[in-house]
């Protein structure tokens, strides 16, 4: 049941909630995908393949911690009733982890353990904060509008990522060969291009960005009063976890969805985590090329998330998820078929070129990336909407904790699998190829869902 708000109060609360997504998005856009991760693999790690493996192991370690703890935290939140104190705690972890990435100097392998630990801490923070933000959704919109609210949140997140990436490329990130930004100027504030301070700034920049944009959530979104003291809530939450499996046995479709989401969502996490690294290794792209690629991908992601929210309310979350997964499978096969000088797994040789995205394989990679961006937003937005429609309201935060677990458990399985295969074969293509299994199996599980509430019904 929705709390009683005036129209103006609900608009302000909804705005504050929506701004959480763009507050977090630079962590994924700048650090995980387009700026810092490729920089780490190409300039800090000994080789791009070793960098991909190390990044995968760090992502996997963070995912393992998230997998164990997120259901417990969600159960505690359901018992205590509070959301914002948890968001503040894990938001601080996000900012600390992001800020420490500044110390990743080029070629200094002694800093690698610090950087990987900082990345893992930031990842844990952003994922746990998202669990509690998601649990606020049902208080802000009726069931028939949840898909739209979720889609708008994802679209706002993509737009925030787009703006932050554009700022980084225009004023800070530099091409390794020229030391200039996308605007053809040295990095702002006297940053040193030789030591890649512009790329390293992506960490502190993300921390400050989050601190500014998350403030409206704390100021405008009401938090339910504490239902019980934290120690009692912890005991109550743990007892709810013990009763979890019996409850899931009575809701087989919820369990099937969580397992399917466990597989495909973490495949998507790994795809974004390694997309920029893969392009850096295969095509030799630097921060500027990968950043432009990210801007274009984020534009399609924003449009896709907006369209996906409408499609979700019109056709249902399950259909949106299946179509998105089909597109991801096609796009992944296409990406893996590309090499620096050929298409279709070497069957079609291509001519070399000079300049930005000059070769046919680079342009093909760009196009397939845009497809991935267009379907990633609808996939993630529809997934959290489907959970709200399947989960019992009294256990919603706990279920979002399970959602985080199901959406992150292969954050140690998928990235670690990519890392292991990459390390064994010394091939980035072989490592990324395993993601096809995650998307295919996830689609099969979602296709088997029955009795999903239809859009517009509580």
Image (cartoon, rainbow, N blue to C red):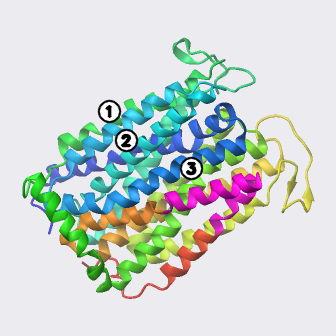
Residue 423 among magenta residues: yes
Question: Disc 1 designates what residue?
Answer: 212
In the rendered image, residue 111, in percent from the top left (x then y), is placed at: 56, 29
Q: Is residue 187 magenta?
A: no
Label 3 near label 1: C-beta < 8 Å? no
The Cα atoms of the two marked residues, 3 and 2, are separated by: 26 Å
Of marks 1 and 3, the one in the foreground: 3
> Would you say residue 209 is visible in this rendering?
no
Label 1, secondary structure: give it: helix
Q: Position of residue 338 (x, y in %)?
A: 80, 56
The residue carrying pointer 1 sits among few (fewer than 14), some (14 to 19) or many (20 or more) residues within 10 Å by Cα, namely: few
Secondary structure found at label 3: helix
Span shown in magenta = 410-436
Q: Residue at coordinates 66% horizontally, 17% vertically from top-left? A: 194
Which image quadrant: the N terminus? Answer: bottom left
Q: Residue at x 26, y 80 (%)?
A: 247
Identify the residue position indicated by label 3 in the image.
57
Specify which label sits upstream in the sequence, 3 or 2. 2
Which mark, by number, is residue 23? 2
């Amino acid at each position: 049941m929705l709390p009683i708000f005036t129209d103006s109060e609900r608009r302000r609360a909804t705005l504050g909630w929506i701004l959480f997504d763009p507050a977090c998005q630079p962590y994924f856009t700048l650090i995980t995908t387009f700026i810092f991760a490729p920089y780490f693999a190409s300039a800090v790690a000994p080789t791009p393949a070793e960098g991909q493996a190390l990044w995968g192991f760090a992502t996997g370690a963070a995912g393992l911690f998230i997998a164990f703890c997120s259901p417990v935290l969600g159960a505690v939140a359901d018992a205590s009733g509070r959301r914002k104190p948890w968001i503040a705690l894990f938001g601080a972890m996000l900012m600390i982890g992001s800020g420490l990435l500044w110390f990743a100097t080029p070629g200094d392998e002694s800093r690698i353990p610090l950087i990987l630990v900082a990345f893992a801490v930031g990842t844990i923070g952003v994922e746990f904060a998202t669990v509690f933000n998601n649990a606020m959704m049902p208080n802000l919109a009726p069931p028939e509008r949840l898909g739209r609210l979720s889609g708008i949140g994802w679209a706002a997140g993509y737009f925030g990522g787009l703006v932050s990436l554009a700022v980084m490329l225009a004023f800070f990130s530099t091409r390794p060969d020229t030391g200039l930004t996308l605007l053809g100027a040295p990095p702002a504030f006297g940053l040193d291009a030789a030591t890649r301070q512009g790329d390293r700034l992506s960490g502190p920049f993300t921390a400050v960005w989050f601190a500014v944009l998350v403030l409206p959530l704390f100021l405008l979104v009401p938090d339910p009063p504490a239902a019980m003291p934290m120690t009692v809530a912890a005991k109550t939450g743990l007892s709810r976890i013990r009763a979890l499996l019996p409850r899931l046995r009575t809701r087989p479709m919820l369990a099937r969805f969580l397992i399917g989401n466990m597989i495909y969502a973490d495949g998507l996490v790994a795809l974004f985590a390694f997309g920029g690294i893969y392009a850096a290794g295969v095509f030799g792209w630097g921060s500027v090329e990968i950043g432009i690629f990210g801007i274009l991908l984020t534009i399609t992601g924003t449009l896709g998330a907006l369209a996906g929210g409408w499609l979700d309310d019109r056709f249902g979350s399950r259909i949106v998820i299946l179509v998105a997964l089909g597109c991801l499978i096609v796009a992944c096969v296409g990406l893996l078929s590309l090499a620096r000088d050929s298409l279709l797994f070497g069957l079609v040789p291509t001519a070399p070129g000079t300049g930005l995205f000059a070769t046919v394989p680079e342009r093909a990679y760009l196009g397939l990336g845009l497809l991935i961006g267009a379907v990633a937003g609808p996939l993630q937005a529809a997934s959290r909407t489907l959970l709200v429609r399947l989960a019992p309201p009294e256990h919603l935060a706990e279920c979002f904790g399970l959602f985080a677990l199901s959406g992150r458990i292969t954050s140690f399985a998928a990235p670690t699998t990519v890392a292991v295969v990459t390390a064994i074969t010394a091939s980035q293509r072989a490592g990324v190829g395993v993601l096809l299994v995650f998307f295919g199996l996830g689609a099969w599980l979602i296709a088997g869902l029955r009795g999903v509430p239809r859009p517009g019904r509580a």
